[in-house]
Amino acid sequence: MALLSCKDVTLGYGSSKITEHLSFQVNENDYLCIVGENGSGKSTLMKTCLGLLRPLSGSIVFGDGLKATEIGYLPQQTAIQRDFPASCQEIVLSGCLNQCGLRPFYSKEEKRRAAQNMERMGISHLSKRCYRELSGGQQQRVLLARALCATRKFLLLDEPAAGLDPNAAAQMHTLIQQLNKSGITIMMITHDITGVIHHATHILHFDSQKIVWETNAQRQKAAPAPCVCPRHTEVRS
């Protein structure tokens, strides 16, 4: 079943278009990797899927009762965010905010879920530590645990291994693969395609003139495709 369907979407800001005629879908248990050059529209697509931006045209539709507020999101961090003076437990718990509504406190179930996700990410021992004191890899695990508190089925990850050393990046990719195997659908922007090529089920490749949507097996077998203009989504079936 399709959790997300993107139908002839144009992405951009105001009257400025970044990407046009984008169509694809993400099904349950898919592991979609989005790759391509900087400025090609990858992060804009993710923000539009989350409802933080509106598509200039076309539609993004959720299935299986999924709502944008029920998607876990791990964005790229800024330097200021890396220096945030809160405990790991507080940051992970904040992933439950959408479920709190007008409640000014977290329920026992939400606290239990936060503790469970910290254990899942191997950071239970860091719960009282200040976030700003952690290594880059530890911070990304905290943010991934936070994203898991917001969802049970769909994670959007914007370069989760960016800036990590090779060992920490490999550990992060392993964690994400394990989450996918446990039944969580993954949609991830990455520049490290070699680190995830064997795990992904589908690839969405942005380049300067076209967008290619294909299965991982097709990507590994296909010869480089000729450039096509105007820019559009090429679906390999």
Image (cartoon, rainbow, N blue to C red):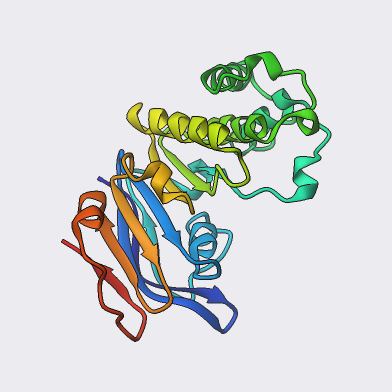
Residue 51: x percent and y percent?
Answer: 53, 58
Quarter where residue 10 is shown: bottom left
Residue 230: x percent and y percent?
Answer: 35, 86
Residue sitting at 20 percent across and 64 percent down? 236
- Farthest residue in the front direction? 166
Number of marks in picture: 0
Figure check: 77 above or below 7: above
Residue 200: x percent and y percent?
Answer: 33, 44
Figure check: 165 above or below 21: above
Residue 100 showing in the rendered view: no
Figure check: 84 above or below 128: below
Please tell me which residue lies in front, 103 or 17: 17
Please tell me which residue lies in front, 86 or 57: 86
Residue sitting at 57 percent across and 84 percent down? 15
- Farthest residue in the right direction? 85
Which quarter of the rendering shows the N terminus?
top left
Residue 216 showing in the rendered view: yes
Quarter where residue 134 is shown: top right
Residue sitting at 65 percent across and 29 percent down? 138
Residue sitting at 55 percent across and 70 percent down? 39
Residue 127: x percent and y percent?
Answer: 71, 19
Quarter where residue 53 is shown: bottom right
In the shown orientation, is residue 23 left or right of residue 56? left
